[in-house]
Amino acid sequence: MGYNERPILERAFELARTGEFINVRMLEKGLAKEGYAKGDPHIHSPSVRKQLKDLCRQHYCQVETDEPIPSWA
């Protein structure tokens, strides 16, 4: 099964844990590159966005550097 055959939320949470994305906006760009539709309503739920944001911040910091994540992220 290809990445874009999986439900978008499943893939979004997988990508958030990779450490490649500093914020949800960048994560959405990653999903779009894999062929997922931009502006999917599932991703725009406030509770989902918060979870994804927290995962991105947690894992990006661990993978890239010990430096704190910028406040704009």
Image: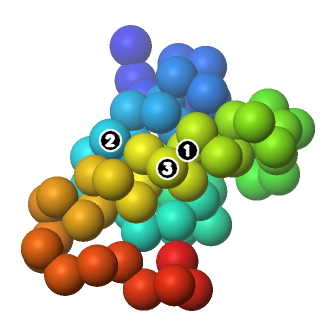
Residue at 61% x, 19% y: name it.
7
Left or right, 71 with respect to 9, comes to left
- Up-down: is 4 above or below 17? above
Left or right, 42 with respect to 14, comes to right
- Up-down: is 53 above or below 55? below
Residue 9 in the image: x percent, y percent? 61, 27
Residue at 42% x, 68% y: name it.
22
Q: Which residue is mark 2?
A: 17
Whichever of labels 2 and 1 marks the residue nearer the N terminus, that label is 2
* Number of on-image labels: 3
Residue 48 in the image: x percent, y percent? 70, 36
Residue at 55% x, 53% y: name it.
53
Q: Which residue is mark 1?
A: 52
Q: Which quarter of the image is occupied by the N terminus?
A: top left
Tag 1–tag 3 contact (CB < 8 Å)? yes
Label 1 – label 3 distance at C-alpha: 5 Å
